[in-house]
């Protein structure tokens, strides 16, 4: 640290920058109170206003929004839940980026995605000239109150020097790890150790108590040996005493961090079984309604499991989020009715050139608890897109399926406004699908092609979706997900649901690594969800073991709250029975807590498609 950051008294009067703090939660409160005690002038904002009371009582001033915090400060400090929260506070309608003067530096103490950090920092500097330091922290509220946090810092050296006095009053250990984003990468490593360590402490305590030894004596007994650690000496005793109040941290936050570790590792092509287990354990605990419970209370999960019975649970309900019906005698689907077949990713699709109706679907799905379906437009006659919707409504009235539908509209059609208005007026319609132009191979991908997601005419049609409250089902291969990310960013009010897991057809190590990297980039957009479907490979049965890894990677990258099961039936009957596809998916998610399995199988589809 520089001399300016060395500890002593508060900074001299008249030399102290004005500070602003966004995010007065558990950590933000402790940090703000510490700064006020050290004599810093402080303006604060929090989404939920009652949380401000302790810091206002201690002398802080209140701002009405993040933009106002920045305008009234020289340095903005931020400590919020996750990447979307940071994005909203900086780039939202009343965000920091809209400030008309004021702050020249932002210090983000949040734990968020490193790639998003670099993106946010570059955009903020380009727009406002404001610098960005990422300084995720470790140590908990108690350490914050004592100014004894650990800060992992990324940013330019000159800006770190400007922040040094502030950081010195909050953290006893400040380490500059490199350029912007390096702090977040370091925090990933930190959380891998911490998250796995909490589970190790809980399991050690669970084992000691079950074996009947003096569990309270364990830290003293093991002190100085290879098993000794800060976790053993500080966290284990809290678990053993069931001392959960005040909370050291919230279970949902550590779960979020562990998911981020998994996603980061998968993006590097790495598997971390210890981290995966820790995430599963915290996921199970949070799924029981313990999102805001103290992280130390994870020991309760083990207590509950020891007491639980072994009765078999009823199968979970399933909403099939992607299926098709067609009656080739009544309707015209060019790809199914015309003599000349189209190029198709599964090869010969002659077996699909037959009627497929609710009775056929119910026969295929008889073993499973199907609670509803989402019919996705089946490339009906493009001259009559609303005709398919009208037929589906008659079919549903007669047969009870489908439940809702995603309709057809060609977004670059000059008449698209009328088509969208007509589709939106239909009660079953929830969204639109129109496949943008795509390259056949990654090396052929180019931005800006006519009919692509960059095409101004296509985007003009897309811009109308929000007016009608329609979501967008996007079917495109992973090598176009950079364009999808820009689309999601530019139209944040429109929900995108990516079809068929972004088509990871190349299962080589290099192919899967590129697919994971593309998904990780898109996952930074909060208004994008991922439909896990279409995982068949031409010329072979549905590969359960290979697909399990793909399914797990997809959920790790997007999170269980943004992924949803879909069968793509009857199209995927070319590569597997419904039972094989459903059972393979269930096997891949079997180690997840029930709450997450419900999200993946039912709840996310119900929410996204507004059942």
Image (cartoon, grey):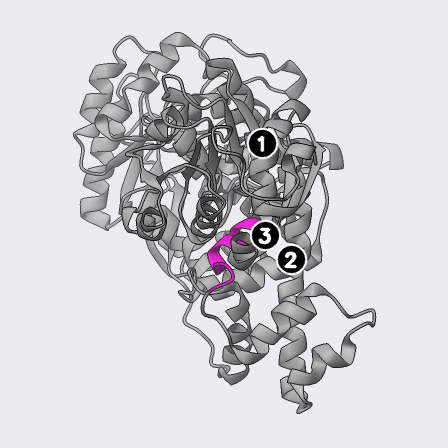
Q: Residue furthest right?
A: 225
**Magenta highlight range:** 247-258
Q: How many marks?
A: 3
Q: Secondary structure at mark 2?
A: helix
| Sequence-earlier tag: 1 or 2 | 1
The relative height of residue 38 versus residue 120 in the rendered view (above or below) is below
Q: Residue at x 54, y 36 (%)?
A: 11
Q: Taking 426 as reference, is 519 left or right? A: right
| Residue for badge 1 | 163
Within 10 Å of disc 2 (Cα), the crowding (few <14, some 14-19, many 20+) is: many
Q: Residue at x 55, y 20 (%)?
A: 122
Q: Residue at x 61, y 34 (%)?
A: 164
Q: Is residue 348 visible?
A: no
User: Which quadrant, please, contains the N terminus?
Assistant: top right
Q: Taking 83 as reference, is 161 left or right? A: right
Q: Which mark is residue 194?
A: 2
**Front-lying residue, 489 or 39:** 39
| Residue for badge 3 | 258
């Amino acid at each position: 640290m520089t001399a300016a950051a060395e500890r002593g008294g508060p900074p001299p009067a008249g030399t102290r920058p004005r500070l602003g703090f966004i995010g007065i939660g558990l950590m933000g409160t402790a940090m703000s109170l510490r700064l006020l005690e050290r004599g810093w002038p402080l303006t604060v904002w929090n989404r939920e206003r009652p949380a401000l009371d302790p810091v206002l009582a201690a002398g802080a001033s209140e701002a009405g929004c993040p933009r106002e915090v920045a305008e009234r400060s020289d340095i903005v400090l931020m400590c919020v839940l996750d990447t979307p929260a940071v994005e909203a506070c900086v780039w939202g309608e009343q965000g920091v980026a809209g400030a008309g003067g004021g702050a020249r530096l932002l210090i983000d103490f949040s734990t968020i995605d490193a790639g998003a950090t670099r993106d946010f920092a570059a955009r903020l500097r380009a727009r406002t000239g404001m610098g960005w330091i990422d300084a995720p922290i470790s140590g908990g509220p108690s350490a914050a109150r004592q100014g004894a946090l650990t800060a992992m810092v990324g940013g330019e050296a000159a800006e770190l020097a400007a922040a040094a006095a502030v950081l010195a009053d909050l953290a006893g250990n400040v380490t500059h790890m490199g350029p912007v984003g390096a702090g977040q990468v370091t925090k990933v490593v930190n959380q891998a150790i911490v998250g796995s360590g909490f589970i190790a402490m809980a399991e050690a305590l669970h084992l000691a108590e079950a074996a009947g030894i003096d569990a309270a004596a364990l830290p003293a007994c093991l002190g100085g040996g290879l098993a000794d650690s800060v976790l053993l000496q500080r966290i284990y005793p809290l678990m053993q005493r069931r001392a959960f109040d005040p909370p050291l941290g919230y279970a949902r936050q550590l779960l979020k961090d562990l998911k981020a570790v998994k996603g980061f590792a998968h993006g590097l092509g790495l598997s971390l079984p210890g981290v995966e287990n820790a995430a599963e354990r915290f996921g199970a605990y949070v799924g029981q309604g313990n999102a805001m419970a103290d992280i130390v209370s994870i020991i309760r999960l083990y207590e509950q499991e020891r007491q639980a019975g072994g009765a078999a649970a009823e199968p979970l309900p399933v909403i099939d989020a992607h299926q098709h019906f067609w009656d080739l005698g009544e309707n015209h689907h060019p790809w199914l009715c015309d003599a000349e077949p189209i190029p198709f990713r599964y090869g010969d699709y002659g077996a699909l050139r037959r009627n497929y109706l609710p009775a056929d679907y119910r026969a295929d799905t008889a073993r499973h608890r199907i609670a509803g379906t989402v019919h996705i437009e089946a490339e009906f006659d493009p001259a009559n897109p609303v005709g398919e919707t009208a037929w589906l409504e008659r079919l549903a009235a007669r047969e009870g399926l489908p439940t809702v539908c995603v309709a057809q509209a060609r977004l670059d059609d000059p008449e698209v406004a009328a088509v969208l208005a007509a589709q939106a007026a239909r009660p079953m319609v929830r969204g639109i699908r129109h496949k943008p132009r795509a390259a056949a191979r990654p090396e052929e991908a180019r931005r800006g092609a006519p009919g692509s997601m960059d095409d101004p005419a296509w985007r003009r049609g897309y811009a109308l979706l929000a007016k009608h409250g329609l979501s967008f089902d996007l079917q495109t291969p992973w090598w176009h997900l950079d364009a999808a990310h820009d689309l999601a960013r530019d139209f944040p009010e429109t929900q995108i649901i990516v079809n068929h897991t972004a088509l990871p057809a190349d299962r080589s190590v290099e192919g899967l690594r590129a697919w994971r990297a593309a998904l990780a980039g898109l996952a930074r957009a909060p208004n994008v969800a991922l439909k896990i479907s279409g995982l068949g490979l031409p010329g072979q049965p549905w590969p359960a073991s290979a697909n399990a890894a793909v399914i797990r990677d997809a959920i790790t990258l997007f999170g269980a709250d943004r992924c949803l099961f879909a069968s793509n039936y009857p199209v995927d009957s070319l590569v597997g029975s419904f039972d094989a596809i459903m059972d393979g998916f269930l096997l891949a998610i079997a180690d997840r807590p029930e709450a997450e399995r419900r999200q993946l199988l039912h709840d996310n589809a119900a929410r996204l498609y507004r059942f």
